[in-house]
Image: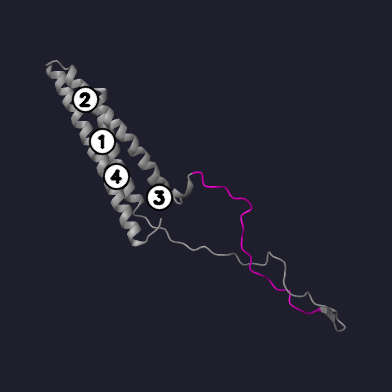
């Protein structure tokens, strides 16, 4: 049985939609926790007086001291993706949304191709079957991609509703 190029593309988008559904549910299920703070140490200049020699031995008295310093970056680079992306899951969400947006265009293209195949079939059973298969796989792929988008939005709203940031 001969597999057409469009059938392979339909299968590809079906598998792609399934993988998107699986991968995004895993990314948004993760949470990250951590603390950030200041660095303490004696790298700064001592505060207090170094002392003056007293007595006959000449040992200094006073407070050499240490201070708490905050590490400041020397230079900072602006985020090229703007305020939308602050973490890896945000970047992944942005990339998945871009991929899904492109897939809508591909779905529309294949719907037009399947309609064109129906019109040009001229009663040939093989061509009509090919057109039906193209339409069927396009619809299946579209449903999987739309389902993936819905699942992503539901998981993201649940996570943001719980106050978990990632």
Q: Give the CA separation, mark 4 to mark 2.
A: 24 Å
Between circles 1 and 4, the one closer to the viewer is 4
Residue hosting label 2:
114
Seen in the picture, residue 61 relative to 149 is either above or below; the reply is below
Check contact, mark 1 vs mark 4: CB within 8 A: no
Q: Give the CA separation, mark 2 to mark 1.
A: 16 Å
Category of crowding for the residue at label 3, using alpha-carbon neighbours closer than 10 angstroms: few (below 14), some (14–19), many (at least 20): some
Give the main secondary structure, helix, strand or loop, of the magenta stretch. loop
Magenta span:
60-80
* Residue 160 lies in quadrant: bottom left
Category of crowding for the residue at label 2, using alpha-carbon neighbours closer than 10 angstroms: few (below 14), some (14–19), many (at least 20): many
Q: Give the CA separation, mark 3 to mark 2.
A: 36 Å
x 26%, y 28%: residue? 110
Tag of residue 89? 3
Between circles 2 and 1, the one closer to the viewer is 2
Tag of residue 14? 1
Category of crowding for the residue at label 1, using alpha-carbon neighbours closer than 10 angstroms: few (below 14), some (14–19), many (at least 20): many
Tag of residue 39? none
Q: Earlier in the sequence, mark 3 or mark 2?
A: 3
Residue hosting label 4:
149
């Amino acid at each position: 049985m001969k597999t057409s190029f469009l059938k392979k593309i339909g299968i590809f988008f079906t598998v792609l939609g399934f993988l998107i559904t699986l991968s995004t549910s895993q990314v948004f299920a993760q949470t990250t926790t951590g603390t950030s703070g200041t660095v303490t140490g004696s790298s700064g200049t001592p505060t207090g007086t170094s002392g003056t020699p007293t007595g006959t031995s000449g040992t200094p008295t006073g407070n050499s001291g240490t201070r708490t310093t905050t590490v400041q970056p020397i230079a900072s680079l602006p985020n090229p993706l703007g305020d939308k992306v602050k973490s890896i899951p945000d970047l992944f969400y942005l990339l998945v949304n871009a991929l899904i947006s492109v897939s809508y265009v591909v779905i529309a293209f294949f719907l037009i191709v399947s309609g064109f195949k129906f019109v040009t079939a001229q009663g040939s059973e093989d061509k009509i079957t090919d057109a039906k298969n193209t339409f069927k796989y396009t619809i299946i792929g579209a449903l999987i991609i739309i389902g993936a988008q819905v699942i992503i939005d539901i998981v993201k709203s649940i996570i943001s509703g719980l106050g978990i940031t990632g």
